[in-house]
Image: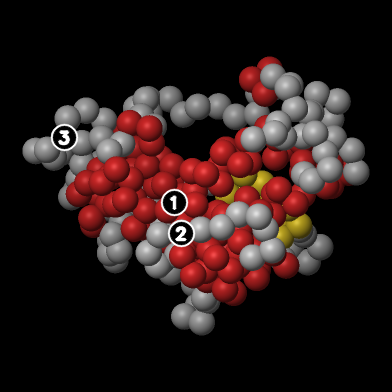
Amino acid sequence: ATRARRGIDGKLVTFARFPLALALSQFLYCKFQLRRRKRGFPRWSPRTKGPLRGLDEWAAHFPNNSSFSCYDPTDIQFRFVAGSGHARSAGGVPRTASLDRALSFLRRDFFFVGVVELFSESLCALALRATGSAPQHCGCGFDSNSKRTHQKAKRLANVSLDSLEPRRLEALARLVPRDLTLYVAALRRFEEQVAGTDLVCPGKIDALFAKALPYACAGAPRAATERVLRGSARRC
């Protein structure tokens, strides 16, 4: 949901995703899933073979007015939190929309903030937040695969961030500096929402912070990320 689509009595719910994983997913979707192949989309590269062919050129293409009629990955989560949002362009975001304002919206306007990497746990936490009780199967140790919470898209290449070299990870990180700080803020919010419960196994949230902070604390996002971390035991 975006702020512009909120109903009179509606409540905003969002699930944040690790920005580098989201950017990679968007590239793979645009490359393999689009029914009509857009002219100019970087599907070929002399330096790379396999499913990741074209990733370097795609990442270098942005920011750009053209997104090949597919996802524009540049701070896409920020765009949807800060404005009306548009998946294919940076439109819909007021010029006055700063990262601090987006962080304020996330903290103040959203009824619940989940985490895609803890999708099953987030669904349980949302049920607890909305109804006052979580389903019986929820809790640390339950088999999340026993519940059909999501389906994998067919025909997507079997590629993960773990298969990317550091230079490619850094190229993706350059596309999403504000999203990285927002993700850290979402992790803090989620951690607060599940405090005092056994919905998330110990160490899972810590592992997500450990993955995100090296990028969120580097370069442009660092100052904003440090503000987000104030009051917690975590530091850049």
Identify the element where label 1 is drawn.
helix
The answer to whether mark 2 and mark 3 are in CB contact below 8 A is no
Circle 3 crowding by C-alpha within 10 Å: few under 14, some 14–19, many from 20: few
Quadrant location, the N terminus: bottom right
Q: How far across and down, in percent of the image, does residue 101 sit?
A: 59, 74
* Residue at numbered disc 1: 214
Circle 1 crowding by C-alpha within 10 Å: few under 14, some 14–19, many from 20: few
Residue 226 visible in the current orientation: yes
Q: CA distance from mark 2 to mark 3?
A: 30 Å
Q: What residue do we see at 77% from left, 44% from top? A: 194
The answer to whether mark 1 and mark 2 are in CB contact below 8 A is yes
Give the residue type that dot 3 points to.
Answer: Thr
* Residue at numbered disc 2: 217
Identify the element where label 2 is drawn.
loop
Q: What residue do we see at 23% from left, 55% from top? A: 60
The answer to which quarter of the image holds residue 24 is top left
* Residue at numbered disc 3: 48
Residue 87 versus residue 154 in the image, above or below: below
For the view shown, which residue lies furthest in the left direction? 46
Q: What residue do we see at 20% from left, 36% from top? A: 53
Q: From the viewer's perspective, tell me whether residue 1 is left or right of residue 21.
A: right
Give the residue type that dot 2 points to.
Answer: Cys
Q: What residue do we see at 84% from left, 30% from top? A: 135
